[in-house]
Amino acid sequence: MSKYTVLIVEDEDAIREMLVIILEQVGFQVVAVSSAEEAQKALADDFPDLILLDWMLPGMSGVEWARRLKKDESCKTLPIILLTARGEEEDKVNGLDCGADDYVTKPFSPKELIARIKAVLRRSGKMNGSTLIVSGDLVLDTEQHSLMIANKPLDVSPTEFRLMQFFMTHPDKVYSRTQLLDQVWGRSVYIEERTVDVHIRRLRKILTEHARENLVQTVRGFGYRFSPQQD
């Protein structure tokens, strides 16, 4: 299946490792951490398609972290599935009230979990509609998470993929580093502006290998612009 990314937040090592195996076996990309604090840091590196979140976590609980995420404009549509041993109706209501999109009770079957994840992804729109963004011979597929030039796949990281997706849907407009951080990384993560420069350099290096070095241009004193018009 398509390489959707799931962020697992689970403090029990055995369960976390089992979840990684289950999801990777059916084709998901997985990032696994053990606390809300680590999960917040993970969002700064790669924004997932869905979060599988344990209710009871050390420090900040999963429910509290979910509630904070849903208050942030850049994260409010990020799908969250709560994973917990709490099975009472009141607990389920409280979990969904915090902004979670679904609720899976332990113990669970791998088939049920995968079915729930796919259902939430479909409801969120990540598995629906047109998936192709085309600019000349540059083709980005949001479902397959692939980027190609002249039918040749480019090896880009998830962050560089999101950066190119934003550029391709906003051509010939200049964006500052701060604007790119807000649009691509989200306002809930706190990273330095030079992080944008690092990913731009990596992206340009890949594009240069395919003679497309002018697609992402520097606008001196302000930021960057994607222009499909080659000099």
Image: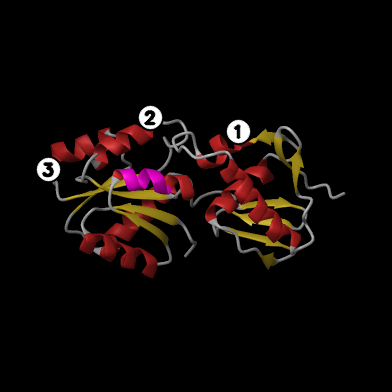
Residue beneath disc 1? 179
As drawn, is 120 to the left or to the right of 229?
A: left
Q: Is residue 131 above or below residue 218?
A: below
- The residue depicted at 56 percent of the width and 38 percent of the height is 181
Residue beneath disc 3? 88
- The residue depicted at 40 percent of the width and 59 percent of the height is 30
Nearest the camera: 10 or 151? 10
- The residue depicted at 67 percent of the width and 61 percent of the height is 148
Circle nearer the viewer, 2 or 3: 2
* Residue 216 belongs to the span the image colors magenta: no
Tag 2, which secondary structure?
Answer: helix
Find the magenta span and give its range. 37-42
Give the alpha-carbon distance from disc 2 to disc 1, as whole Å.
20 Å
Residue 208 percent coordinates (x, y): 75, 59
Circle nearer the viewer, 2 or 1: 1
- The residue depicted at 79 percent of the width and 61 percent of the height is 211
